Amino acid sequence: MSEARMTARILVNGQAIEREVPVRQHLVDFLREDLGLTGSHLGCEHGVCGACQVMVDGQVQRGCLTLAVQADGRRVDTIEGLSDSGELAQLQQAFLAHNAFQCGYCSSGMLLTALHIVRHHPDADRDAIRDLLSGNYCRCTGYQAIVDAIESVLRGAAQPAWTPDPAASATKRGAR
């Protein structure tokens, strides 16, 4: 017996997509396997870690808990589309400036949550930022740098309070 399929019409990163999809295929699997958009990762596959997050009609949503057919008629933005459009540029710069990227596995979900915070919680303090990030797991950073990066964007200061000594950096690279 073959698996039931439906046609899904989804606006993905501004591009209209129409595909026959298995009715039980998760949105993140559709994006990764069918469209080659691999920025959203599969972590826990239970909606706990946040690595699979995408934006659906402008709201952060777990791609592993959403079926592709549930996105029919909706707009889905992935980390690739938001990065290419420049919408994440300030957050990406802040994450780099504050060393908030480590292994990178959680980064796409963290950046989408950070964008949600910037858009919908512009007055969030550090405790609120931590609460809003609580649905995203990062096993590398301890969250301090991520909170610093988001806070810097919210406060309009995407650069860290410290700057490395250019002479020390040049010496480390072997320059004289």
Image (cartoon, rainbow, N blue to C red):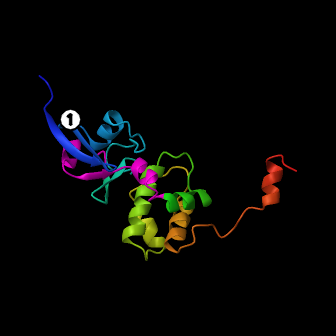
Residue 171 screen position, x and y as percent: 83, 51
- Please indicate whether residue 126 sits to the left or right of residue 9 in the image: right
- Please indicate whether residue 170 sits to the left or right of residue 50 in the image: right
Q: Is residue 22 covered in magenta?
A: no
Tag 1's secondary structure?
strand
Residue 65 screen position, x and y as percent: 27, 47
Name the residue rendered at 56%, 56% in the picture: 100
Image quadrant holding the N terminus, namely top left
Q: Is residue 69 covered in magenta?
A: yes
Name the residue rendered at 32%, 50% in the picture: 14
Residue 4 screen position, x and y as percent: 13, 32
Name the outermost residue toward the bottom. Answer: 123
- Name the residue tied to disc 1: 21
Q: Is residue 56 above or below residue 23?
A: below
The kind of residue tagged 1 is Val
Name the residue rendered at 38%, 57% in the picture: 135
- Please indicate whether residue 160 sits to the left or right of residue 129 in the image: right
Name the outermost residue toward the right. Answer: 176
Res 20 visible: yes
Q: Is residue 45 above or below residue 56?
A: above
Residue nearest the viewer, comparing 27 with 35: 35
- Crowdedness near tag 1: few (<14), some (14–19) or many (≥20) residues, C-alpha within 10 Å: many
Res 65 visible: no
Image quarter for residue 58? bottom left
Magenta span: 63-88
